[in-house]
Image (spheres, rainbow, N blue to C red):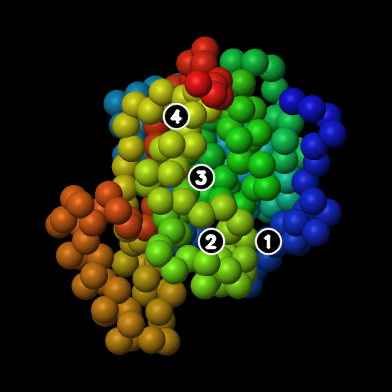
Amino acid sequence: MSESFKITDQLAGVYDKQYSEESRQWRELGAKGKAENILEIAKGMSFKNVLDVGSGDGSVLAYLDSKKFNSNMYSVDISSSGVEEIKKRNIPSLKEVTCYDGFHIPYPDNHFDLTICSHVIEHVEFPRLLLREIKRVSKYQILEVPIDFSLNVDKKVEHFLAYGHINIYSPQTFRFLIKTEGFEIIKDLKAVYTNELLNFLYRKKWIKRIKQKTLFAIWKCIPFLMNVKPSTITVLSKKTDKGLEIF
């Protein structure tokens, strides 16, 4: 990967200061759902060592550790404040946590059996470059993004930028991105946000909370709807010798 790439200074500054006690409850609730998706899609598989790319404050890592997911976990993140939060957790299975530049994962080719990248790709400026680095260092991958796409998504720019979402996906466009970068998709998992997260999001809007829970209950019963507009998609993939090819 070219050494000329680096994260935009403004984005780097935002993420470097992102992690504080004020948003801890939100992060912990979100982490549970993300980790449960990882555990579900990796069920029946085992990995010698696992890298988590974009670990944030380590909430997902801590939950995976509590479920004995793997005894050899590694972490990289662009945020120095996030790295410090991870270190404070003293996660038993975490062997190393490193602050990196967002582009060059500081490990050799094929160093990891599995790389996890959960709710990161929607934030990065050059998602294909990140995917190529993930592919370089790992044999298998678990990739998850929120499904933000809708027909009027262009009218919600400020809303998504407030969350740092600069890439918008549907299940189909996310699978397309992964396949065109030379990953073989083994399976995917589509899910809706947990009741615990909805209770927190709409804690002061009980009517909207009930409405959203009802919609999700209906959604989960109809495969077509889950394939079109779930809350998240989690993909288990493995690397191939192929890269981006234009025919």
Q: Dots 1 and 2: beta carbons under 8 Å?
A: yes
The number of discs equals 4
Between disc 1 and disc 3, the foreground one is 3
What is the C-alpha distance between the residues marked 4 and 2?
A: 30 Å
Query: Residue 179: which disc?
Result: 4
Q: Amino acid at mark 2?
A: Arg
- Point out the tag, 4 or 1, that comes first from the N-terminus: 1
Query: Residue 118: which disc?
Result: 3
Residue ID for mark 2: 27
Rendered residue at 44%/42% (across/down): 174
Q: Local crowd at mark 1 within 10 Å, few (<14), some, or many (≥20)?
A: many
User: In the figure, is residue 207 to the left or right of 96?
Assistant: left
Q: Amino acid at mark 3?
A: Ser
Residue 160 image offset from top left, x and y in percent: 56, 66
- Point out the tag, 1 or 3, that comes first from the N-terminus: 1
Residue ID for mark 1: 19
Q: Is residue 86 visible?
A: no
Q: Amino acid at mark 4?
A: Lys
> Circle 2 — which element?
helix
Q: Local crowd at mark 2 within 10 Å, few (<14), some, or many (≥20)?
A: some
User: In the figure, is residue 127 to the left or right of 60?
Assistant: right
What is the C-alpha distance between the residues marked 4 and 1?
A: 33 Å
